[in-house]
Image (cartoon, grey):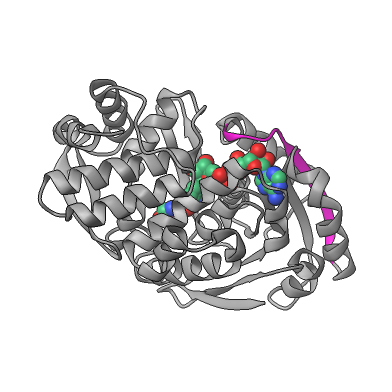
Amino acid sequence: MHRHILTTPDGSSYPILTGAGLLDICGTELAAVMKPCRAVIVSDEHVAPLYMAQVKKSLADAGFSVSEFVVPAGEESKSVATLGSVLEAFCEAHLTRTDIAVALGGGVIGDLTGFAAGCYLRGIRFVQLPTTLLAAVDASVGGKTAVNLEHGKNLAGLFHQPSAVICDINTLKTLSEHEIQDGSAEAVKHGILDDPALFEIYESGVPTEKFEEIIVRSVIYKSRIVTEDPNEKGVRKMLNLGHTPAHAIERLSDFGISHGHAVAIGTAMMTRAAVKRGILKNDAAARILNTLKRTGLPTVCPFGVSEMARIAALDKKAAASEITVILPETIGRCRMEKLPISALEALFTDGMEGQA
Ligand code: NAD
Ligand code: GLY
């Protein structure tokens, strides 16, 4: 088992555990960081039949008083309506300020449960038990929680750090290839941002044999960024590489294109745009595009420039007239650029030029 501690600037910290078989011992691991209390485990209809019983037993054996709440699987559950149902479930379970919520699932369950925990009784603690590669390498770490609004992705949410993250890599065995690709997109993103060795696992290695290393490298990098900038005032924006186009793609496809696949297309677009703007060399761009393809990820945007720019602007206009985009400079280093929203169309045009 790999144990990493993420410390935030206010001095609080939490453990991030990665390894095989951790669901069986998650109760004792949690009891090491908190007094056993009431716990509501939130999960979805795909994950609960696979892992709920195991988690319930482990928590109950460690002295927690456990109940469960299961929501439909998929992005649709990141909604205000589902958030309301989770909050009502917390009430029914009589959760108090000293109790906990446990997110058992992928990024959807983590984001939803974290938001519910962050606003229930003005904030109770929560724990992440990520069961997708995407949640393990990215969503479970760093305390970003949210639901989607009609106007766009993640528009209601808060920063609320978990009390622990426990990732049992055995859960990845029941994921489909598509879901593995989703998580791989975020891991490749981390490689492009900071970690050439992580990138090379995807470029020329056998990633399916290296999930633990992929997760640990991602957790270490992401923890460093979150420690420096937990509320995304500066350097944390780097983690949004590819996300401005990705959010537009998700919405234009009515969430038919999953987050990770959309991030891959968005990363490919920022790669082409960086070459066009003289920031990234052609050979590094070719390595990025080939690695995304080798991972089974898409690199071509199926929507037109103007509809992409219109949706991305709608999404961002809710909060700002400017947008920060991330452009690769080389594999392992990216830069931030602030652009007016009106520049999105030109950026997306560059990002789609010559795509194949
Ligand atoms: P997801 O949670 O919808 O999971 C994908 C699918 O896999 C679902 O159908 C789920 O039921 C199923 N599943 C989960 N674990 C399984 C398992 N072990 N075996 C079999 N099936 C399993 O999607 P995701 O890709 O994990 O997360 C995407 C979400 O995460 C998006 O909403 C995205 O915005 C969010 N996200 C958040 C952050 C953050 O920092 N908070 C970062 C990245 C992404
Ligand atoms: N996934 C981006 C972040 O956590 O900041």
Is 256 in front, or is 114? 256
Q: Is residue 53 visible?
A: yes
Horizontal relation, residue 191 to residue 323: left or right: right
Q: Is residue 111 visible?
A: no
Q: Quadrant of residue 8?
A: bottom left
In this picture, is 187 found above or below 44? below
The answer to if 69 sits in the magenta stretch is yes
Is 215 in front, or is 148? 215
Q: In the image, which residues are magenta?
A: 64-75
Q: Quadrant of residue 354?
A: top left
Q: Residue at x 27, y 60 (%)?
A: 234
**Ligand 2 placement by image quarter:** bottom left
| Residue 236 spot, x, y in % from top left | 34, 60
Horizontal relation, residue 67 to residue 276: left or right: right
| Residue 181 spot, x, y in % from top left | 53, 46
In this picture, is 10 found above or below 314? below
Quadrant for the C terminus in the image: top left
| Residue 32 spot, x, y in % from top left | 73, 78
Q: Quadrant of residue 313?
A: top left
- State the residue lying farthest toward the left: 278
Horizontal relation, residue 92 to residue 227: left or right: right
Is 65 in front, or is 139? 139
Quadrant for the N terminus in the image: bottom right
| Residue 300 spot, x, y in % from top left | 35, 33
Q: Residue at x 78, y 65 (%)?
A: 37
How many numbered circles are shown? 0
